[in-house]
Image (cartoon, rainbow, N blue to C red):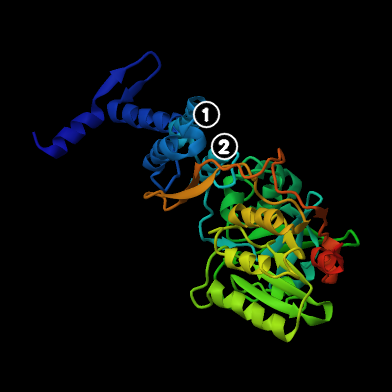
Amino acid sequence: MNKKNLMNKNIFKTRKTGFAIITTPLICLLSALLLSSCSPKSSLTLDWKPDLQLVKQEMRQKEVSLATNSGRAAAFSSKIDEMIGRLPDYDNDDQVKIDLSQAIASLGQVHTNLGLAEEKVLPFRLYMWQGRLYVTDTITGYSEVLYTELTEINSQPVRSIIAQLTDVISRDNEQGLLLNIPRYIIRPSILHGLGVIEDKNEISLTFKQEDGTDIQKSVQPVSQNDSTLNLISPYKDTLLSSINSKRNYSFTNLSAEQTLYVAYNSCEEDPEYTIKRFVQDIKTSQKASPVQKVIVDLRANSGGNSSVIHPLMTSLLQDPVLKNHVLVLIGRGTASSAMLNAYEFRENLQAKLLGEPTNGDPNKPGEVQFLQLPETGLTVTYSTNEFHFSATTDDALMPDIPVDYTISDYREGIDPVLNAALAYRFQD
């Protein structure tokens, strides 16, 4: 029998039922439709299972808090296994990223996290103050919302989105939230994974002005590395922290105040400007214009190699005038090796710390390793060694002189932390 006749025979082959006479192909079609409606259909485009298995295996063996605590390791493994079992139920890859970030954040360590991938972002720099998010910088097209409060995203209250993010962000303390919520909330992938938005290319935002009136904006994300997008940065030429923000380390001799300001932005040596040359330049500057006080700004320093700054510490220790006249500025951006350096300045040079608590616990693990996930291209960082360099029970390195940085300070172009340091007088 040829194929055509076989098909015709099947078409007309019937089966009697209690309700009707249904052809066999129609039974197959109805069965397929019924099964497809009952079976979960995932929209994932990435192969998550091998990456999730790798995260579980690698971190159980090498992440210090898991490798030394079997109960903690079992709980973490269970979270990952649950994710693997739910993979067919996810609507999109961004949801999986959120859950993985949440599982890793449950370990409660700033160094153990799911790295943020390079992507388009909303064109704003935000600052979190008193539980609210304010625009502190943007591009020209959105200048009218500068210094306003971001209140809604896609008609959802920002406060509810902040509440969702608290479980997603890895941190040692609450300072980690103050620093990272502004960074996470401008990422469409994160908003998409949280279910706040569907369209990642056009996002509706609401801003509240000082007078209480709202501004509605439909915003398109921009590339993070687009050099043609110039931020407004109204006070970039007047604030010392902005003027000295472009290099790993730089200094300004404030001759009128007899003060040396050092911006130490990254614990990494610049091959084009060695730390040895940097220290020598400072000494040369002091000869031309002597100073009585040194301010070391670590507020933008998230860490690296803690030994890079040691030549400057040694130089100050050998200076009979400056060795006990050092002030260190710290804040929510100070973490890891920079936090250790702040501690060393206080211990070795009796420096006073001014500003906010650090984004890091002086007694939490460090020595970070990187795990590249081959299928998704994401990076997981994790700690491999315990550190306890402070006798304090605080979950941050605390300032000796607390100074708050308010949204009013941003509006007026004031740096209250630096101003407090400039006004400080040592008691000899």
The image quarter containing residue 344 is bottom right
Name the residue tied to disc 2: 107
Q: Name the element at disc 2.
A: loop
Q: Does residue 334 appear in this view?
A: no
> Relative to 121, does residue 54 appear above or below in the rendering?
above
Q: Residue 343 location in percent, x, y? A: 67, 53
Horizontal relation, residue 395 to residue 88: left or right: right
Observer-nearest of 51 and 423:
423
User: Which one is nearer the viewer's eye here, 320 or 117?
Assistant: 320
Residue 172 rendering spot, x and y as whole percentages: 64, 43
Question: For the residue marked with disc 1, what is the amino acid?
Answer: Arg
Q: Which residue is mark 1?
A: 72
Q: Provide residue 68's location: percent of width, then percent of height.
A: 48, 31
Q: Secondary structure at mark 1?
A: helix
Give 197 or 182, whichever is nearer the viewer. Answer: 182
Most extreme residue toward the left is 1
Quadrant where the C terminus is found in the figure: bottom right
Is residue 402 visible from the viewing direction of this image?
yes
Horizontal and vertical percent position of residue 149:
80, 58
Left or right: 268 as drawn, with respect to 236: left
Amino acid at circle 2: Leu
